[in-house]
Image (cartoon, rainbow, N blue to C red):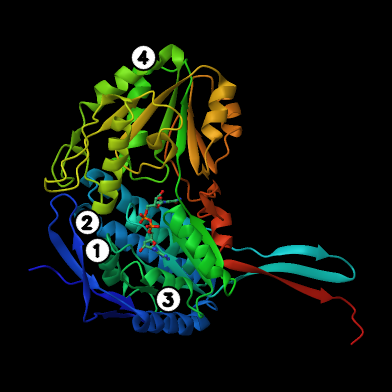
Amino acid sequence: MTKTYQNLIDGELVSTDSTLEVVNPANEDVIGLVPSCGKDELDRAVAAARRAFKTWSKKPIEERRAVIMQISGIIKENADELHRLLTSEQGKPHQQAMGEILGASAMAGAQATLNLEEEITEDSDTRLSRTRRVPVGVVGGIVPWNFPVMMAMQKIAPAMLSGCTIVLKPSPFTPLATLRLAELIKDVVPAGVVNIITGPDELGPMITSHPDIDKITFTGSTATGKKIMEGASKDLKRITLELGGNDASIVLPDVDVEKVAEQLFWSSFQNAGQVCVAAKRVYIHEDIYDDLSKAIAEYAKTVKVGDGSQQGTGVGPIQNKKQYERVLELIQDAKDSGYQFLLGGEGGDPSGTGYYVPITILDNPPEDARIVAEEQFGPVMPLMKFSSEDEVIERANNSEYGLAGAVWTKDTERGVKIAEQLETGTVWVNEFMQLSPFAPFGGHKQSGFGAEYGKEGLLEFTYPQVITLKRDAAV
Ligand code: NAD
């Protein structure tokens, strides 16, 4: 029988009469039913978070840190169960699912070590002025379907550490591992501090416009991010938006072609390309273009596309039908436009079971091809030739997005110089997708607003408050 999951509201596991079905993208089986919350459940969760805020925000940071550390430990202890559940709902191969679960545990634990020190801004004979950080209040967290557990913890951990309480909404496509986590942490988190509620997309705007939520932290598409900004403007809620990207990788002619081919492959095909910071445009210097593109295609042929729960699978299915159809449409458009494929190009098999797209590598499509200019979010890699540094920097920056990018070269000084000219929040030189819990992660341009991780990410859950004491005041 299909398992029915519950939500966490005010420290209790709760059900609703109506439920949503969660589908395994590898075989389209319904694998779980989750509550379909509406306004009533949201109001209950927000009221619980508001009540809990009164005491949680007053607790010493050490106490809050200890609870996050406990959660981090619980995730690690239950990694075996959680990663299997994650593969079944998200599609990513077991090894990558385990990476997400252990990563969520490690990142939360590391973030919990941050501090919110006061800053003395004036200490003179006349005045002592200090800036302290106070929590903003009740946070609404909204999470996408590509890294559901990682993204949930990315919001829960800093919110808790800052003294905020949170109402978190997973994506309706991937709520199961997060709800299992809710069951596991129920008894270690004080009632109301963390509330996890599920519902259709329509629950999102209700959160954004809820009058008793003070801040929204959102990860998802740029289109939804704009709606959130609009909704949050009505009562000037604080917002953090982690949005889409169309990241460029730039490969200089001095690289070792064989060594870099495999790394470049995975920089695009991790999680079947459904990564905000995946390399979605790969620019290769013309001197090595033929050799490197051939080496990438040869490596790609060794990678198995299939059910993530099967041993040996490297690239799983697309997470949901809508995204599957979008990726197929982009491939069809490239085909109709006469672009060349080094691999793939036949699209998927919409009549088959599961949302599989064969690994697709394009051979030097034009810059304005839809498959280059748009975020594909699927197992698609357009390779493009460039001849000069200035030209490739301009092409890489010619995007409304500005999330991340990478430069590959033996000449690290030159690599860093190029990195500094890219208009993105993060640039890696000779690696990819490495996020640090201590460095701010956020997008430039339409890839986001604000940052997560690091001190900057933590401060987003706080207001500055300046307390100024006049010495020798005549009162
Ligand atoms: P999405 O924007 O469709 O949905 C994200 C979440 O928002 C879901 O929980 C959804 O239910 C909710 N939502 C939908 N409509 C809403 C509305 N009007 N108001 C409030 N909430 C609403 O995104 P997705 O398809 O789940 O995720 C893929 C996108 O996320 C890609 O563009 C990807 O690049 C981006 N992403 C960004 C980052 C980052 O850190 N920058 C990380 C992961 C994914």
Tags 2 and 1 touching, CB below 8 Å: yes
Q: Quadrant of ligand 1?
A: bottom left
- The residue that label 3 is drawn on is 193
Q: Residues within 10 Å of mark 1 (few under 14, many from 20)?
A: many
Tell me which amino acid carries mark 2. Answer: Glu
Q: Earlier in the sequence, mark 2 or mark 4?
A: 2
Q: Is residue 96 visible?
A: yes
Identify the element where label 1 is drawn: helix
Work out how far the residue at label 4 is from the one at label 1, CA to CA, in angstroms: 44 Å
Q: Residue placed at 14% from the left, 69% from the top? A: 3
Tell me which amino acid carries mark 4. Answer: Asp
> Any mark on residue 74, and which?
none
Q: Earlier in the sequence, mark 3 or mark 1?
A: 1
Identify the element where label 2 is drawn: helix
Q: Is residue 158 visible?
A: no
**Coordinates of residue 365 in the picture (x, y in percent):** 39, 26
Q: Nearer the viewer, mark 3 or mark 4?
A: 4
Q: Earlier in the sequence, mark 3 or mark 2?
A: 2
Location of residue 249 by image quarter: top left
Work out how far the residue at label 2 is from the one at label 1, CA to CA, in angstroms: 7 Å
- The residue that label 4 is drawn on is 290
- The residue that label 2 is drawn on is 89
Q: Earlier in the sequence, mark 2 or mark 1?
A: 2
- The residue that label 1 is drawn on is 176
Tags 3 and 2 touching, CB below 8 Å: no
Tell me which amino acid carries mark 3. Answer: Val
